[in-house]
Amino acid sequence: MDGISTKKARNPGNQCRSLLQKRLEYAQRLKRQLKRLIKTKKISIYTVVGFSVFDPGAAFLLFPLAVVLIPAVFLRHRMASKLYQEGLAVEFYRNAIARMEDRWVGRGDAGVRYLTSDPLFADDLDLFGRGSLFQLLCAARTSIGKDTLASWLLRSGTVAEIRERQEAVRELSQRLDIRESLAVLEFDREKFRLDVLAEWGNAADPSRESTARFFGVSVVVSAVVLWSFVGFGFWFIVGVLLMEFGLRTLLRDRLQANAVPAAEMLQARAALAIIRNAVWPVSFHSRLLTQIRTTICSREDGSTLVHAFYGFVVRSPFLLLMVRQFTSGVDRWRRDVAAQSQERLLAWGQLEALASLAQYRFEQPDTSFPEVVSASPCFEATQIGHPLIPASRRVTNDVTLNDSLRLLMVSGSNMSGKSTMLRTVGINAVLALAGGPVCGERLRLTPFAIGTAMRFHDSLEQQTSHFYAVLTRLRRIMQLPTDGQPLLFLIDEILQGTNSRDRVTGAEALAKALLKRNSVGFITTHDLELTRIVDSLGEHAANVNFVDQLVDDELHFDYIMRPGVVQSGNALVLMRKMGLDV
């Protein structure tokens, strides 16, 4: 299909609905044509078979029938393939519409498996799981594309890397045709893993080939010596078979290791050929996309693979030596092309990850690309909101954290928006540092290491209390390796689970320790005594708050962050509304 621009003046929802309708209509036409083709083929076969039964002389009709049916079989396969691709296109547009209509929760991969590598913030910021950022973003169809997107969300890129990704995402967001073509590539992602080539290639051991060659040559030399003594007869055959049996026993594990992944190897390389054919006709402007295309479309030297089959068929004089020769040839081929195949796979993963971020940009044209700078730690946002909250209910705020104002102490009543504010800052930082657009008008930030302390779990089995879990998380934040990057800390309800006096003393000491590091961030609290520690921190800290209003015995929240300390609470009102007699 022709390239389609995603200018803001054009409604992406209407655009996707229109294209979905065209795809559905075309799929229906293909189904009708395929049914007619199948019906015609069956009638032709039944007719000729019937004539042959009642009139054996009509059997000559089978030859022209075969001439007609063979192209029909290929045509049927081609139409079925096209119908499958149309189904993928329909799924692509339906998922896009569902996301734009806020019906995306539960659709697609939730990426729960990536929570096991939680770098201190993934669970707190809802990066993975049902209704997560990953589920919202991921349009990748292969495991390596999903892994790449997850790795970008979990680890910040450098300033140069982020800017390159932004440029690529901008370009891809305006190329709906390319994103659709990636979504409808015809390969079964469930039957193989595209990274099997890299894994198998890395497992190749050069010492095994020399060992195999040594034993193989030994068998041949021994066979020649045996032939010179006993001639070509019964004992010669028995001797050779015994030597071959010994060789096979010695190389058993290696033979099995090569035989098992062979089918997966061929399937994965076939998929890479499909990917190469899809990317080859496309031209890009951004440097990263051009580099990805060059890597995916690079030519490979298949001479070693041909040599392996040549050795298997021609050069090996004995049956088991043929297996030895073949496996040695495959080892040579693995080492020759594994590195290049791994590069192509990583490039494909990058392309799918960029397409996922670009699809989000296309579906949410009000998002903006952040300015990523190499400077003192800063997170300066205008009208920033949470991307997982529907736009109809989303409330945006301005946030300023920099070298002058490094800590915001947030107070407020229950359900007023304190925790959501921390998650808004964190999840937009993750989006920005992955190279994607953020949910706000403007954002300027530096690459951060992110540390959060928001969700805590005590454990009866491990004999850890809630307060111990809080301290464990805070210690991890203080010890978090930043690799030279500043730290963005987001701490919710600091030191909850202990008495008020210890909480004030501990929170003040922790805040001072954090500010000694190259860091900026938020701390929230219900305890208004903690807001006084801002006075001891000087100009680098300030109080902000969220409030609620009681109107006709109903609580109303505006979720707007205001300067100063909150002056009201709603605990008694909530308790009474829950039926507690207080």
Image (spheres, rainbow, N blue to C red):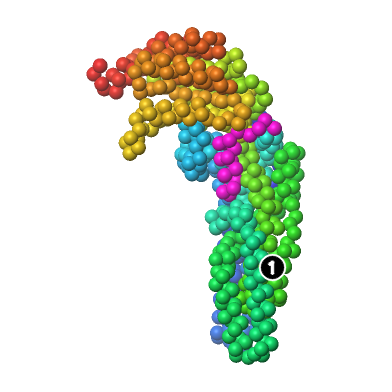
Going by the image, does 334 lie left or right of 522? right
**What percent of the width, then of the height, locates residue 111?**
50, 42
**Does residue 274 sit above or below 235 in this rendering?**
above
Residue at the spot 41% in from the left edge and 15% down from the top edge: 505
Going by the image, does 392 lie left or right of 237? left
The range drawn in magenta is 141-160
Within 10 Å of disc 1 (Cα), the crowding (few <14, some 14-19, many 20+) is many
**Does residue 238 sit above or below 249 in this rendering?**
below
Residue at the spot 44% in from the left edge and 23% down from the top edge: 492
User: In the rendered structure, which amino acid carries the disc numbered 1?
Assistant: Ala
Q: Is residue 471 visible?
A: yes
Quarter of the image where the C terminus is located = top left
Q: Quadrant of residue 360?
A: top right
**Does residue 323 sit above or below 295 in this rendering?**
below
**What percent of the width, then of the height, locates residue 276?**
70, 53
Going by the image, does 1 lie left or right of 54? right
Residue under pointer 1: 308
**Does residue 35 sit above or below 146 in this rendering?**
below
